[in-house]
């Protein structure tokens, strides 16, 4: 008899868990409350325009390939490797495209911003080596199991401990290496990749620059939604059961171990449960008679977002796949998001245009704009008024930067915002990544991938260890599978 696994949610963390657990021979069923599989990585058509509704930055595509091949050696995951990471626009009119690859980045920083090439190289080399040392310990394994930790990788990570800038936040370390405030801004921005502030997040997170600048972003052929579509198709083909439109209402447990799930439609027996639901809501809504780990859950939440999906009836040659229009005062913007919990009057605007590489995402001569601004979590702000004001400010700022009144070109529109992120995907107060990493000990303050109270209960996705972003969610699933094997050693995997 195979062990039976119930998975709550169908985000990439859940789909990766389904594949990893199917791979070791378990009987897996996934429950998704929405009608679409994929969590936040889903697509939608607005007239002839295709939009990815959530993530747009995709790094470490090899992880996706390995995930699919783990189930089927012939499985392929096709993607474009982008030659530029992002186009940056500043309020003074300067616009700089950063190419991918260390040497090209160093040259661009020198020619466009007068940065010292030696210092820039030192920074990027350091981040590459820090990444290689940190990744095996902080991302690939559980920080909460001694047997995962003991070994060569830990020694490797400890050997570089003085290179991480443990006493610094991201901004302080970036300022130490770069003299031009615009360059500091470019590197600081990477804190937003897990919903944090560079003025509070530990300098260790500067390793993200290894993925952004040295390796560069990729774009799945067919769009971001292909990530979850491919995982779903393969998992279903190999026998994972999927129930959409079926919300899980509680995790059943007896005598300290998981025994099943109640959904809004039925009850099911399971030996193992993996929750991909936001960890806060897993405790709040699905678990009763269990102590809540308040210290872990009461950390500051990650940021949320307001997104405008605009079908634009014109093409803008100045724009690439990823574009940033920076706020003048970046620090004030993060203070607004995390302290006063408001939208900044001069927001940093991110525009993603997949039709630049996937022509069929928009009709000829047109573009699909995903226009995103980082936002505070929902604490009951007057979002309807705030969003209308934000829309006006975005249009004004983009119209100046692009020297074109863009409003008449907005052909179709849809909006996503913190209240909807909470309602659609159960992201607590609209937070995108669970806890923010605005703390020196952030890595240690994420919830483990397993329950210390209930045998058979595991957690995957961006709200638990190792943290925010698609690659990390895939890693969370790998850790879950490893823990399951350790916890149930008598099963013939
Ligand atoms: C606007 C936006 C932009 C983003 N940009 C990026 C980016 O560029 N790059 C990046 O890496 N990440 C980005 N992210 C974050 C990204 O969404 C995550 O990295 C990743 O997709 C989250 O995956 P996950 O496995 O944690 O689960 P989610 O995608 O959060 O999925 C959880 C699923 O669980 C379901 N669920 C919850 N409760 C229940 C229940 N009780 N019963 C049944 N089902 C339930 C939900 O409906 C949801 O489908 C972005 C997110 C947003 C919203």
Image (tube, rainbow, N blue to C red):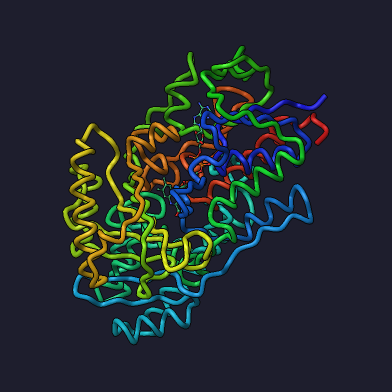
Q: Residue shown at 46%/56% (left/top)?
A: 56
Residue 484 in the image: state x and y as whole percent: 68, 34
Against 133, residue 17 (above or below) is above
Residue 253 screen position, x and y as percent: 59, 15
Residue at 62% across / 47% down in the picture?
A: 229
Left or right of 124: which side holds 436? left
The structure residue drawn at horizontal position 66% and vertical position 26%, both measured from the top left corner, is 272
Where is residue 178, by image quadrant? bottom left
Quarter of image, res 428:
top left
- Relative depth, front residue between 412 and 213: 412
Q: Is residue 262 left or right of residue 380?
A: right
Answer left or right for 31 relative to 167: right
Quarter holding the N terminus? top right
Residue 341, placed above or below residue 104: above
Q: Nearer the viewer, residue 124 or 393?
A: 393
**In the rendered image, is residue 162 in sight?**
no
Q: Is residue 27 left or right of residue 229?
A: right
x and y percentages locating residue 360 in the rendered image: 53, 61
**Pick the front one: 471 or 179:** 471
- Which of 88/335 is in front? 88
- Rendered-image quadrant of the C terminus: top right
Residue 188 seen by the camera? yes
Location of residue 400 in the rendering, given as x and y in whole percent from the top left corner: 20, 69
How many tags in the picture?
Answer: 0
């Amino acid at each position: 008899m195979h062990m039976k696994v119930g998975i709550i949610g169908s985000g990439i963390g859940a789909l990766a868990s389904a594949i990893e657990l199917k791979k070791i021979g378990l009987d897996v069923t996934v429950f998704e409350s929405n009608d679409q599989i994929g969590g936040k990585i889903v697509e939608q058509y607005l007239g002839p325009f295709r939009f990815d509704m959530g993530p747009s930055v995709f790094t470490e595509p090899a992880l996706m390939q390995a995930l699919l091949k783990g189930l089927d050696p012939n499985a392929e995951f096709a993607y474009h490797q982008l030659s530029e990471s992002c186009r940056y626009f500043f309020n003074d009119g300067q616009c700089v495209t950063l190419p991918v690859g260390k040497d090209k980045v160093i040259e661009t920083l020198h020619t466009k911003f007068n940065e010292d090439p030696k210092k820039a190289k030192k920074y990027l080399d350091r981040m590459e080596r820090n990444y290689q040392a940190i990744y095996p310990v902080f991302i690939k394994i559980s920080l909460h199991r001694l047997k995962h930790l003991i070994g060569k990788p830990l020694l490797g990570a400890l050997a570089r401990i003085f290179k991480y800038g443990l006493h610094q936040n991201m901004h302080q370390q970036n300022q130490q290496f770069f003299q031009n405030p615009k360059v500091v801004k470019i590197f600081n921005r990477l804190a937003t990749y897990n919903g944090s502030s560079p003025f509070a997040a530990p300098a260790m997170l500067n390793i993200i620059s290894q993925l952004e600048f040295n390796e560069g972003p990729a774009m799945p052929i067919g769009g971001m939604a292909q990530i979850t579509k491919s995982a779903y198709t393969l998992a279903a083909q190999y026998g994972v059961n999927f129930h959409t439109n079926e919300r899980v209402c509680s995790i059943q447990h007896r005598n300290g171990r998981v025994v099943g799930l109640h959904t809004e439609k039925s009850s099911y027996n399971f030996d193992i449960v993996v929750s991909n639901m936001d960890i806060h809501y897993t405790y709040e809504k699905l678990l009763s008679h269990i102590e809540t780990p308040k210290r872990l859950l009461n950390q500051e939440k990650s940021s949320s977002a307001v997104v405008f999906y605009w079908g634009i009836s014109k093409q803008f040659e100045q724009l690439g796949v990823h574009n940033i229009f920076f706020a003048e005062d970046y620090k004030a913007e993060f203070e607004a998001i995390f302290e006063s919990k408001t939208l900044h009057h001069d927001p940093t605007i991110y525009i993603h245009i997949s039709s630049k590489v996937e022509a069929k995402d928009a009709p000829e001569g047109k573009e699909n704009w995903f226009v995103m601004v980082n936002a505070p979590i929902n604490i009951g702000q007057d979002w309807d008024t705030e969003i209308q004001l934000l829309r006006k400010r975005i249009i004004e700022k983009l119209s100046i930067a692009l020297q074109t009144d863009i409003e008449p070109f907005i052909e179709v529109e849809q909006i996503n915002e913190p209240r909807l992120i909470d309602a659609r995907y159960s992201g607590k107060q609209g937070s995108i990544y669970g806890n923010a990493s605005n703390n020196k000990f952030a890595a240690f303050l994420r919830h483990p991938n397993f329950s210390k109270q209930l045998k058979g209960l595991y957690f995957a996705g961006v709200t638990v260890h190792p943290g925010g972003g698609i690659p990390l969610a895939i890693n969370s699933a790998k850790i879950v599978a490893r823990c399951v094997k350790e916890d149930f050693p008598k099963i013939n995997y």
